[in-house]
């Protein structure tokens, strides 16, 4: 018999007794091991025999010997992969128990060797994370190398977004384990670099509808920051605040004390990085509250927008959601305070703008929209206008809701700067597009004040629902303000007619403006406005027009295109007169129609005429 045949014969004889007599089976294998100590199959059959009989101690012992002597065998690695998978998934089965009974050094070598056999970065990362979790002492060697490998792989792959696979592994899988495992022997600079990458990742992650997991929260980043704080010798919050406002109060107090810290005992890096995280978290949460589709990518919602309250007599209406309004205010003011800190120190400002350029923050529409709101709040309308002009060039890659918000801000800002023509021009340029996007809604939630700025005291800012019903009154006031400045000095029936149409909204709010137009018509003694028949349905205005025609003898031409009956009369203008009164009757019959719906149609169909009048 040749050697191979002899080995096979011993293994066959051992298997005959596996089920009936384990001692005889072991005897045959023991003899085979003595005769053929370098045969892998003999060693592996002994392992399988003990495994089938759940003899875990002996399994671990045999496997340790096999791993020492036959590390290149494929069948061995198939078994090792099963053991490691059992440990990873915490299935608590027999293989996980065998692995735990192996010597610690063998366990480490198995995991490391298994990782090194992987080409896929995800699988490699998964195994090294397992290694660090089980053996924290390996973190300083393998954990740091893994972190740097992920950073380099991301650079090499030239990812277009920080929410990429390597960054996700680094921030959510690797760094939390590194930070939990004690002294890892790296400088503070490493932690600052990791914190920058983590902040950028979460800022984009939570505002990216295609990536975001609703089960993930900003607390992950705060936990990571807190863990890194211990390595960087940062001061601990004595109140251990977990709420945004509490964390903001702590850092503001730390910043105030740092200004008089002659002995340099306060770590300014702590203030800088913590403030950036507060800015990103609070501003993104604020914008998600204002406009939920920043996260959900849904167009079926009614977001809020911050605009100047143009009506000084308007009082705050009942708030639809106390919780939401409180969150809106808190998130806004935390972000505002963070922004102030980052721009109160020359070094902070320089470093922050350096990071913002690296992160390409100008492409984060949600952040740009928040900064527009913040600068509106501060009354810095020139800065707002500059930012709006930049964003206007990118409307082709914006969502419909973002475009609505952008152009509403543009109208409001032009008006606040006293640029009435530009305000109306901005509105009329996109009036058809934006008005069609602002679908009518039922049960429109009321608006509420954000919290009035202290300077100047007469300013009043309100968060309004970005719906047609809410914004139409804002637009009406802007259009009427401009039209009034025109018809006081310009004799133009079209301007007077447009003013009459707008003054119907929320009657009798604009009653005096309507009567100013009517007095102008009476003074002139004539009025020609063709859209009258279609767009004037307000009873008091109709009655006044009829009165001016009949009692004051004003020459009023409505130029109706509606069909009328032909009368055989002796008077040459009898038909025209009948046409006029028939039109008046039809308008009276429509007096119960929705003015909002009427103005929606009017703004779209009369866009060119409005643009001409207001230019």
Image: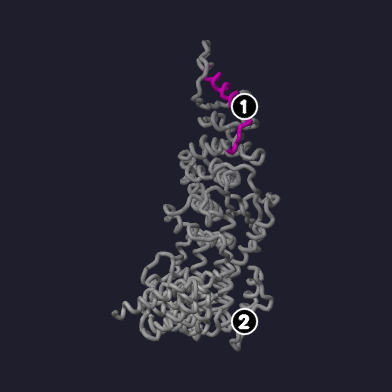
Residue that lies at the very extreme toward the bottom in this rendered image: 263
Is residue 297 shown to the viewer in this render? yes
In this rendering, does residue 352 appear at all?
Answer: no
Report helix, strand or loop for mark 2: loop
Residue denoted by label 2: 235
Please report the residue visible at 59 percent of the width from the left and 63 percent of the height from the top.
378
Disc nearer the start of the sequence (2/1): 2
Name the side, left or right, on which 314 lies relative to 374: right
What's the residue at 38%, 78% (across, down)?
10
Q: Identify the mark at residue 565; answer none if there is no mark.
A: none
Q: Looking at the image, which residue sits at the far left?
A: 2
Camera-nearest residue between 142 and 530:
142
Colouring convention used in this rendered image of the protein? one colour
Magenta segment's dominant SS is helix
Q: Is residue 388 left or right of residue 159?
A: right
Quarter of the image containing the N terminus? bottom left
Rate crowding at label 2 as few (under 14), some (14 to 19) or many (20 or more) other CA atoms within 10 Å: some
Q: Give the foreground label among 2 and 1.
A: 2
Which corner quadrant of the image does residue 225 belong to?
bottom right
> Picture coordinates of residue 368 (x, y %)?
50, 61
Q: Position of residue 383 (x, y in %)?
A: 51, 62
Q: Is residue 252 above or below residue 422?
A: below
Residue at point 65%, 38% (across, down): 507
Q: Is residue 126 magenta?
A: no
Q: Secondary structure at mark 1?
A: helix
Q: CA distance from mark 2 to mark 1?
A: 73 Å
- Which range is magenta? 575-596
Circles 2 and 1: CB atoms closer than 8 Å: no
Q: Nearer the viewer, residue 212 or 547?
A: 212
Instruction: Please name the residue that numbered disc 1 is placed on.
Output: 588
* Percent of width and height locating residue 352: 50, 73
Q: Position of residue 356 (x, y in %)?
A: 47, 69
């Amino acid at each position: 018999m040749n050697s191979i045949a002899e080995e096979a014969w011993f293994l066959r004889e051992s298997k005959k007794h596996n089920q009936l007599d384990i001692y005889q089976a072991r005897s045959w294998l023991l003899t085979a091991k003595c005769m053929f100590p370098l045969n892998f199959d003999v060693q592996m059959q002994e392992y399988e025999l003990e495994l089938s009989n759940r003899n875990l101690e002996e399994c671990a012992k045999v496997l340790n010997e096999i791993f020492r002597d036959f590390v290149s065998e494929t069948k061995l690695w198939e078994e090792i992969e099963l053991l490691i998978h059992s440990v990873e998934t915490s299935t608590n089965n027999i293989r996980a128990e065998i692995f735990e009974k192996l010597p610690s050094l063998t366990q480490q070598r198995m995991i490391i060797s298994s990782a090194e056999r992987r080409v896929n970065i995800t699988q490699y990362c998964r195994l090294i994370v397992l290694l660090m979790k089980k053996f924290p002492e390996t973190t300083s060697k393998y954990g740091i190398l893994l972190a740097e490998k992920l950073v380099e792989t991301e650079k090499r792959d030239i990812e277009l977004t920080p929410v990429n696979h390597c960054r996700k592994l680094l921030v959510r899988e690797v760094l939390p384990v590194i930070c939990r495992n004690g002294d890892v022997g790296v400088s503070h600079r490493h932690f600052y670099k990791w914190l920058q990458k983590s902040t950028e990742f979460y800022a984009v992650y939570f505002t990216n509808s295609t990536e975001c997991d609703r089960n993930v929260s900003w607390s992950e980043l705060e936990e990571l920051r807190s863990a890194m704080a211990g390595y960087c010798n940062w001061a601990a919050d004595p109140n251990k605040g977990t709420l945004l406002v509490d964390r903001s109060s702590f850092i503001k107090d730390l910043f105030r004390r740092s200004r008089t810290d002659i002995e340099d005992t306060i770590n300014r890096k702590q203030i800088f990085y913590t403030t950036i995280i507060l800015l990103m978290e609070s501003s993104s949460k604020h914008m998600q509250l204002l406009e939920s589709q920043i996260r959900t990518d849904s167009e079926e919602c009614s977001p809020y927008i911050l605009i100047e309250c143009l009506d000084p007599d308007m009082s705050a209406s009942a708030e639809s959601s106390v919780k939401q309004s409180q969150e809106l205010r808190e998130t806004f003011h935390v972000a505002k305070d963070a922004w102030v800190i980052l721009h109160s120190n020359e070094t902070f400002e320089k470093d922050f703008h350096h990071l913002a350029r690296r992160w390409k923050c100008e492409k984060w529409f949600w952040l740009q929209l928040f900064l527009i709101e913040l600068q509106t709040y501060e009354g810095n309308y020139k800065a707002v206008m500059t930012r709006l002009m930049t964003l206007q060039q990118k409307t082709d890659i914006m969502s419909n809701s973002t475009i609505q918000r952008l152009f509403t801000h543009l109208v409001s800002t032009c008006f606040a700067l006293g640029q009435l023509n530009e305000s109306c021009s901005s509105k009329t340029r996109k009036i058809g597009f934006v008005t069609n996007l602002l679908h009518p809604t039922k049960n429109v939630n009321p608006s509420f004040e954000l919290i009035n700025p202290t300077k100047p005291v007469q300013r009043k800012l309100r968060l309004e629902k970005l719906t047609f019903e809410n914004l139409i009154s804002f637009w009406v006031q802007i259009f009427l303000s401009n039209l009034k400045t025109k018809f006081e000095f310009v004799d133009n029936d079209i301007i007077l007619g447009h003013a009459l149409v707008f003054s119907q909204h929320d009657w009798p709010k604009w009653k005096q403006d309507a009567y100013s137009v009517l007095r102008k018509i009476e003074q002139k003694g004539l009025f020609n406005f063709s859209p009258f028949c279609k767009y004037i349905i307000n009873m008091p205005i109709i009655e006044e027009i009829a009165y001016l025609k009949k009692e004051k003898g004003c020459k009023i031409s409505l130029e109706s295109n509606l069909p009328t009956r032909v009368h055989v009369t002796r008077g040459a203008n009898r038909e025209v007169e009948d046409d006029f009164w028939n039109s008046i009757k039809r308008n009276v019959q429509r007096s119960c129609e929705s003015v909002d719906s009427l103005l929606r149609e009017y703004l779209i169909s009369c866009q060119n005429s409005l643009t001409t009048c207001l230019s």
